Amino acid sequence: MSSPVHVPPDLITDAQKHLERVQTLGHIIVQVRGKAPATMPHGGRYHFLWQALTAVPTDKPILSLSGKAFETWWDSWSKSHVQDKTQGAAFLHGLSLMHWEWALEGDSEGDSALAGRHYALAGYYWRQLLARGEYWESFSAAQRHPQGASFGQKLRERIGQMIINHHFEAFKFAHRSGGAPQMLKTHLQGLYPWTENPKPAMLKSAISGFKGDQELLQGLDVYSESLFKEWLQSFLDEAKKILDDPNHLAKGMRKNYEGAIKSLDPLLNLAPHNPRLFKDVLLFVVEQVNLWGQDYLMQEDENHADQLVNRYATWVDLLASICTPPAPDMPVLGDADTLATAYLFRARMASDVNKGAEAAREALRWNRHAPDLEFQVTVQAVLREADQLTRAFLDYQGRRDILEMDAQINHILELLTRARDLTAEACRKDPSNYVIRDNLTQLEREIRERPNYLRAHAVRSMFGRR
């Protein structure tokens, strides 16, 4: 006769809880989906929820509702019960689990809208619950644990970490397996209750009137944000490995900038929703774009450098929106130095004089130790336009109209004159600067010689000589 199989008590308890959860959640889900109501369970850890549901007055036949009507009622009903001061922590605990499992159901079915909404609500309820003294008192009594501050702190962090890590891992899995961008966003939104301040409006409305211990809430937020930054750092560490990979360097490039930045695309696509949390990612990207641009300029490849400015301008501006320029008496370090370099790069590549000056002024906000920055880039932009028009004039192959030719030469002369006047003004302000003096001398020579050279070239072209 065979010996009886020993089943650990914990396994039996876990199986019982699983069945209760599936049975209860199944009933709620079929109500929302508009299907025929399932048999309503009468026991288990969700029994208090069903007691509350069936206590609704008979003139509100809630349990006969389905689909959107039931979901609308559920939102209103759960909100009113959360605000009810007579409800204990057990009610909030059950509600947290209900929304969590509702989200898991949507996640498994690929319903990102349903999953995202309920992950956020579950996370917010959990966050409030973990900061409620009543919950810890009942938990401590039930588990026969001492009511110690260190125990509560460790347990709060452990539960918070479990919930947050669920979203981290789901995000990574969806990214690796090519999951839909919306599902990636869903799991990021699931982190908002723990990391975003102020809290999203939907969550504020859902828990209006419910307050946990503010000191504990603040501690949870700080801890959760540190977990989030650790998670982002794992992506940055991988990007740095790609950056330094010598086997994937483009011609003339010191680093694999494009590959490193591309590996962060899933995070960059989500950064506009909460740029503060993604600051380290944005800073890394802008730093690499600055170096990438320098490599192009070293090769005199202004075309690709210009494309780079336009391609990553959004991320530069987004980083600037969450940073603070240094005070005049403070050194220019870190993000300020990176942003100053990025805006100088933009100013240098600007074909429009006004846009170049605007970028130069923005660079000055981040680097106040370079007062002639706007002058330099404005003159460079004016000279770049004059040089572009000069090349176009010299490369022209068709028959020339005399009046049009004079207008083109006069426009080039006006640009050279403007650059000369700006340089002369800078020279008056700083007469000891020999670089500015040399530039002024060269510009005066250009004003005398370039128009004559262009006219001579045009005459030779008209008579078939070069």
Image (cartoon, rainbow, N blue to C red):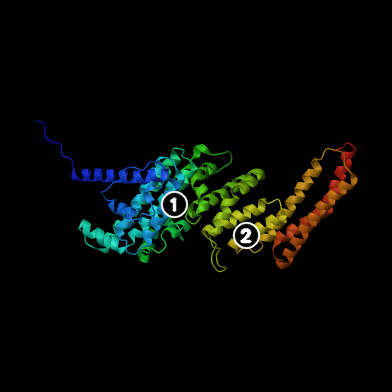
Residue occupying image coordinates x 78% and y 47%: 389
Q: Indicate the quadrant containing the N terminus: top left, top right, bottom left or bottom right.
A: top left
For the residue pair 215 and 130, the one nearer the viewer reads as 130
- Residue displayed at 54% across by 39% down: 249
Location of mark 2 (residue): 362
Visible residue check, residue 227: no
**Relative to 195, is 27 above or below?**
above
Q: Left or right: 418 with respect to 256?
A: right
Instruction: Indicate the position of residue 334 as horizontal and vertical percent values.
Output: 51, 58
Extreme residue toward the front, this view:
59
Q: What type is the residue that disc 2 sits on?
A: Glu
Left or right, residue 292 beside residue 89 = right
Residue 251 point in image, percent of width and height:
58, 38
Q: Residue at x 37, y 56 (%)?
A: 125
In the picture, which quadrant includes the C terminus? top right
- Spatial distance from mark 2 to mark 1, Cα to Cα? 48 Å
Local packing at callout 1 (Cα closer than 10 Å; few below 14, some 14-19, many 20+) is few
Task: Give left or right: position of 157 versus 415.
Answer: left
